[in-house]
Image: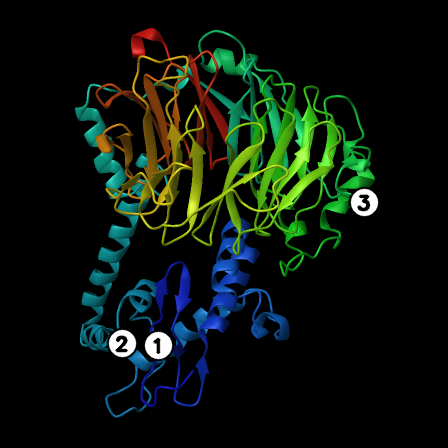
Amino acid sequence: PGTAPNASTTASHVSGGVIVGVVRVSAEMSISSDEVNFLVYRYMLESGFTHAAFVFGKESFSTDTSVAKGVELPPGALVSFIQKGLQYLELEANLNEDGTDVDNNFSMLTSSDLLSKPVEDLKHLVKTKRSMSDSERDAARREEERKENEKMTREANDGPGVSSMEIDDDKKHKKDDIQNTPKDEISVLEGHTAEVFICAWSPTAERLASGGGDATARVWTVPAGPSGRVSGNAVSAPLVLKHEAKKGSNQGDKGDSDDAKGTSNGTKEKAEDKTKRNSPERKKDGIDDWANKSKDVTTLDWNFDGSLLATGSYDGIARVWNGEGELLFSLDAHEGPIFSLKWNKKGTALLSGSVDKTAIAWSAQTGEVLERFAFHTGPTLDVDWRDDESFATSSMDHSIFVCKLGSPSPIKQFKGHTDEVNAIKWDPTGTLLASCSDDYTCKVWTVDNDSCLFDFRDHQKEIYTIKWSPTGPGTRNPDLPLLLASASYDATVKLWDVQSGTCVHTLAKHTDPVYSVAFSPDGKHLASGSFDKRLHVWRVKDGKRVKTHKGEGGIFEVCWNAGGDKIAACYSNNTVNVISFKPEDA
């Protein structure tokens, strides 16, 4: 990078999650974008934002640069750097016009001033305040204190971090006929000690699995009947499935390592095993011991009869557990975090997709690798079975592959997206494949054509996930039309009719990105969860919102139980909430 001869600072810009440009502090010294990115990456790790740090590190390549390999940074380097920059800016704002020093009273500026105003405005502010009398300065100081006190009072009444948009949205909700579900009608499942990223109901029983950033999955037995505080208090302690580092992990090993021993409920842990979490055992694919920094459980899936639960983790290991919480297999062949994990319909094979750019099919009986598929040139973001032998994979490389067990090459490749393909889903009959991307589009494909059948472009921001309705010919609900739901960072959910290729409803009550959608088993209702803390239930027929619940954190995932009378949502405040859905709600 070059230098700016007479500039104090030149601001960088952000593009695609990567900081671009150069920050210049003087004519003799500059800092490159790689150095800035590495400072931000280190700050994220030190602050506990491990998920965001990994994604940022990969997108910015900051972990692969010479800066990362050749520089030893002290803890808090970014904060220290910013503090020194603010001090320099404060000094510059307090200099006289001729550049001479002033008295050492720098109390004219606040940190908010320094962060939000250019240097010329700061100089004007300092000049204005210096011309004030002592009484005027005291009055100005009291006014600032009054505004700060008002802000604190508002946060105390509305809850910390409540934005004006959220307050306005609350008012908007009050204008509707739909009121927030009372808290005493919600079962709150507590036990996780970090964010809960994923949840899924067993297909055959009232058992709910959840996975979080505390390196555990938990299996809850939810009582029959309506949800609520009474029901929540009646929930027995969950099975706790601990995701710990293994000695000499080999793919297909039986679960006979230290982390698989203990009582049948999978919760007992030997004291000596606790130290293994921080042992530097795995350094894969330039992730710099990433596995030991985070064992977030990022994905999980029940097999067809609910007898086995598979979990995928940031440590690159997939694990298979039985109904009693015993670890049967640790599937250790990936070289990076696992983002997607699916059983085939018969439960004979498990498919996993990883940041290492591969997908692996595993035997459900032995835990051995059946086949590795390495066709992508970027991290694999999602996998989905078409039937018991063929499946699709999507990637950050913008492409989609359709593969088949036993076939050395893909049977189909779909190209058309211009950015990362976040999710893929086959329709209930395995005829249509839907995909969504950071390019703001949702596409529908068939294996008989190279180009997409539909290209839906109505969203205004990235599309995070998609779901097919359990309706249409060949399903249990053949009289209802087949629909596709898409959830986006633009805070909307859209319902698409794949017969006409049109958007039939835009569901727009959320105020923050929508991370999850789920159809009810009968296909008549759709649940959506957003980082605005709200779970909404919509009637598919007319797009009307029929039920809502506001939790205490952002929602990562929502799901219906097999009976269609309960909805679970997992939250950023470490909890799982269960809400009843009664016939009168419809």
Q: Position of residue 387 (x, y in %)?
A: 53, 28
Circle 2 SS class: helix
In the rendered structure, which amino acid carries the disc numbered 3? Answer: Lys
Q: Residues within 10 Å of mark 3 (few under 14, many from 20)?
A: few
Q: Measure the alpha-carbon separation of dots 1 and 3.
A: 52 Å
Left or right: 545, with 31 as reference point? left
Disc 3 designates what residue?
247
Q: Are marks 2 and 1 in contact (CB under 8 Å)?
A: yes
- Quarter of the picture holding the C terminus: top left
Secondary structure under badge 1? Answer: helix
Q: Quadrant of residue 181?
A: top left
Image coordinates for residue 50, horizontal then vertical, percent: 55, 51
Q: Give the residue drawn at x 40%, y 76%.
A: 22
Query: SS class of the residue under badge 3?
Result: loop
Residue 256 vs 482, above or below: the answer is below
Q: Nearer the viewer, residue 307 or 49?
A: 307
Q: Give the number of the mark in front: 1 or 3.
A: 3
Q: Could you tell me which quadrant the N terminus lies in?
A: bottom left
Q: Earlier in the sequence, mark 2 or mark 3?
A: 2
The kind of residue tagged 1 is Leu
- Horizontal arrangement in the rendering, residue 521 relative to residue 584 (left or right): right
Please, what is the three-letter code of the amino acid marked with disc 2? Val
Q: CA distance from mark 2 to mark 1?
A: 7 Å
Q: Which residue is mark 2?
A: 119
Q: With respect to residue 476, does 280 lie above or below?
A: below
